Structure formats: structure tokens, C-alpha cells
Amino acid sequence: MKAVRLIAKTVALLLILIGLAATIVPHYLDRIYYEGPESGHYDGEHFFNPDGDADTLRMPRRGGRRGFLWSQLTGDDGRPDWPDTVRVDASRPAARVMGDAMVATWIGHATVLVQTQGLNILTDPIYAERAGPFGIGPGRVARPGVAFDDLPKIDLVLISHNHYDHLDQATLKKLWRRDRPLVVTSLGNDSVIGQVGVPATALDWGRERAIRPGVSVVVTRNHHWGSRWFADRNRALWSSFVVKLPGGNIFFAGDTGMGDGRWPEEAAKLGPVRLALLPIGAFRFVPGQMAAGSHIGPPQAVQIFERLGASTAIPIHWGTFRLSYEAYDTPPKLLGAAMRCSGVPGRFAAVRLGEPIEVAPFRAAGAVRTSDAAMRTCLDTPQVRALR
């Protein structure tokens, strides 16, 4: 066993050295994914968060880049154990869901199939066994809740940014060959998607793409960053999305930190949010942490839900790939506690991978806004402190 660990650490060290070496040859690894006029979030070369990038640039743990990469590759940092695999009862969705009825199926990580108005919409589809380049990266502990071959014909794909756990080129290539869906993303990611022969419509924040009369997609702001390599950081934009629909909108947060916290209200101005797809995992890198600069945790997911004025939410971005240090089931447990601290108990659907959920019609909620201080005070309990 010691020999296996030594070999694993040696391999990890070599990978770190290769990665660090890559940072001194940006002419080789850098990519120009987008060229266009400067804006309030683009300086002519790189995109940035208008509400500040300090929290997305900071390493989530002490020890700098080398220490973080070492702990990620080896798991040698005292993190709680995760299961090697979890049970998934996969399903086979209907071919179509017509009219104002809406059915959502969480497939895994940030991949959700939403069916309504005769449209099949797929968010950040990833079917890869590992979330990373060259087969290197966190491995999948939960198989997809819908097998790829059981997916209905996909009409619309939303790609939030270019990180490997959200932009899976192999899956997009298979979808394109099979279904020829419309792929909508934010600026620059069309270049990455196009590397495998898949055309995509890339839009800036606030821009809209009509799908058909009464249905459109708006690319909206969130708070994150993008990169495929070590030296191409923020060459492509990150985003959330609003799908505008007659029976109430869908909001897909993508991958995001809280930032200034105003972007959910910007999305809410586009119309009532019937369904919000909100991340709750990959937020803890030190004991007790409730959120990271680039990833909201469950308490902030509840606050975003409140600011959206959403009717129903599905928690995503947890329990598929291990990207941080919290225990496997900490995100849903902490979400339950945060919901009890707010005025929205029960409004997050208790979803299992592969389980089709019938989304209720939009129902306006009362104006609720749980403050950071109130949330922290309410969550300061022995039960929450015991969550690793």
C-alpha cells in the first residue's frame, strides 16, 4: 500500500512540474478565443468580473498553486472520504413534454435536462469519466442519471463556460453528430467548442437569441472565471442563462460565486423564474467554509433563490465529481439547514440523479431576503458545525 501511495505521489509531482513548466511557455499554451471591442467586462485581451476578481484569483487554500495542485491530485490533506461509487437509478425521459408542463431531470453535476413547450434543453452536458484534460482530473463517482443513448433529441444546449467539468468537447461532438442542436454560450467559448467541429452561438452578457416565437435565451451575468490551460485564463467569458418561456422562465446559474450578489436580480427582471438550477457544491477548501470566491455554497444558493423570486429550484453541481474538500453529503445537509433559516423551506426540490421532476407552475413568492448576518447566526449550531 505504501508503494502505491509513493507511486501516486511521484506521478502527481511530475504532473505539477509539467503544469508549472507550462506557465513559462505561454506562447505555446495561450489561446486567443475572442477578439472584440473593450467593454465593462473585457479589456481587449481578457474578460473580468466588473464586481472584482480578487476572490476568483485567490488560491482557495494556503500553500499556493503547488500546494493546491498537490492536495488535489493526491487527496493528502485530511479531507473526509468520499464513496468510490454511489447508486444511481437511471431513467429514460419522454421524447417530448408539450405545452406549459415542465419536467426536469438532473443527470449529474451541472447537467440537467429540462423538457417543456416541446423543447428538450440540456445544460453543461458532461458524460466524461474524468473532468480534466488527457483523462486526468477528478473521476466520476456517480454514473449519469440518463444514459447518453437514452437522451431524447436535444434542441438546445447551454454552455456556461470552458472549464472541463462544464464544457465536455467529446459529449458536445456526439450530441452534434446525433441531433444538430442549437448550442448557445458566452463570448469565446464558441472557439473552444468549434475545435471539435461543433458550431455554437456565442453572445455577450445581456444579449438574446430567439428560439421560436415566445421562446428565447438571454446570456446573463454571474461571477466566475474561465480557463482550459494554465496560461489562457479569462480568454473566454463565463455566464448564467435565462430561457424565456410562456409559462415562466428557466434560470441556469452555471458555475458561480456570489460576487456583488446583484446579478440574480438582473436575471429576475427578465420575467418570473419558474425553475432555477443553482449550484450547491465545491465550496469548501478549509474547515467550516460556507462559500468560495468562485463557487457559492448552500447558504448563498438560498439567498440567490430569494433574489430571483423563483418558484422552484433544483440543487446541482454536487455529488458527481469531487472538486473540493467537503464530505459527499454535506451540500444537501447544509442546504436543508439554510432553507430552514430562510423563508423558502421546501422550495428546493429533493432531487435524485435520474429522477424526473414535474415542475409546478410559477407561483409568486413573498419578498424574502435573508441577510448574511442572519444566515450566519442561524447556521451557528452544533449540527452545522459538525458537517465536514
Image (cartoon, rainbow, N blue to C red):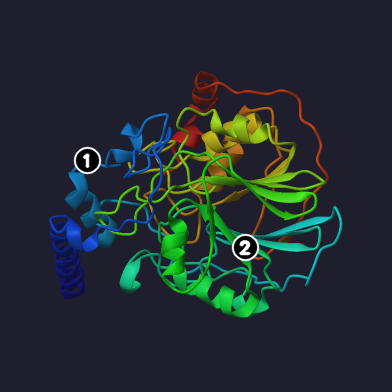
Measured from the top left, where is residue 2 in percent x and y? 17, 71
Residue at 14% in and 68% down: 10
Residue at 50% in and 29% down: 381
Q: Is residue 92 left or right of residue 146?
A: right
Residue 211 placement: quadrant: bottom right
Residue sitting farthest toward the right = 99
In which quadrant is the N terminus drawn? bottom left
Measured from the top left, where is residue 97 in percent x and y? 81, 63
Q: Amino acid at mark 1?
A: Arg
Could you say which disc has been placed on residue 353 in the image? Answer: 2
Taking depth in this image into account, of 202 and 322 the one nearest to the observer is 202
Q: Is residue 31 left or right of residue 127?
A: left
Visible residue check, residue 29: yes
Measured from the top left, where is residue 236 in percent x and y? 40, 51
Label 1 secondary element: loop
Residue marked by disc 1: 62
